[in-house]
Amino acid sequence: MKLHGEGELSREPDGRVRARAKKGTFGVHPNPSQEETTTSTSFTELPTIHFVTDEEAWKIFDEAARRYLKISGKKFLQKWDKGEYPDPDAEGGVMSVAMLIPTVRRSVPQQ
């Protein structure tokens, strides 16, 4: 996969990535040998990419556990690791929280 097109990528001081691209020329192409060209000369500002910090990831996870299961994120992880959710689809909200586990496994719980 190759990032292609006419434009520029820059990193903001806070770590966000900003893209400015010529319309119709920017994106990810799975097969670089089949890239298409364009004669467009107008530019457009693409949305800013924000990567969540470990603290933000933990906050999102904890809020989801409290919202869907009425327990803390830390308690959910303890129960998950003990196998107390043998069928995550059987209990409403478990899968919604479980899908966020990879985002917090990289960090240590803040609470």
Image (tube, helix red, strand yellow):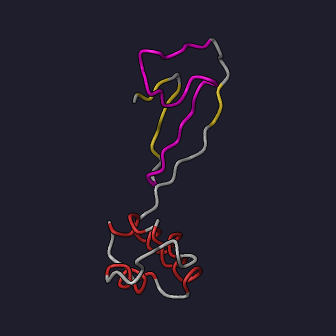
Along the viewing direction, whichever of 19 and 96 lies nearer the viewer: 96
In the image, taking residue 15 as reference, residue 47 lies left or right, namely: right
Position of 60 relative to 43 (above/below):
below
Percent from the top left, x then y, of residue 64? 54, 75
Q: Is residue 57 magenta?
A: no
Residue at x-position 51% and y-position 71%: 89
Quadrant where the C terminus is found in the figure: bottom left
Residue at x-position 51% and y-position 53%: 50
Residue at x-position 43% and y-position 82%: 76
Q: Which residues are magenta?
A: 14-38
Residue at x-position 45% and y-position 44%: 11
Percent from the top left, x then y, of residue 47? 60, 44
Quadrant where the N terminus is found in the figure: top left
Percent from the top left, x then y, of residue 68? 58, 79
Q: Is residue 16 magenta?
A: yes
Along the viewing direction, whichever of 88 and 75 lies nearer the viewer: 88
Percent from the top left, x then y, of residue 55? 42, 71
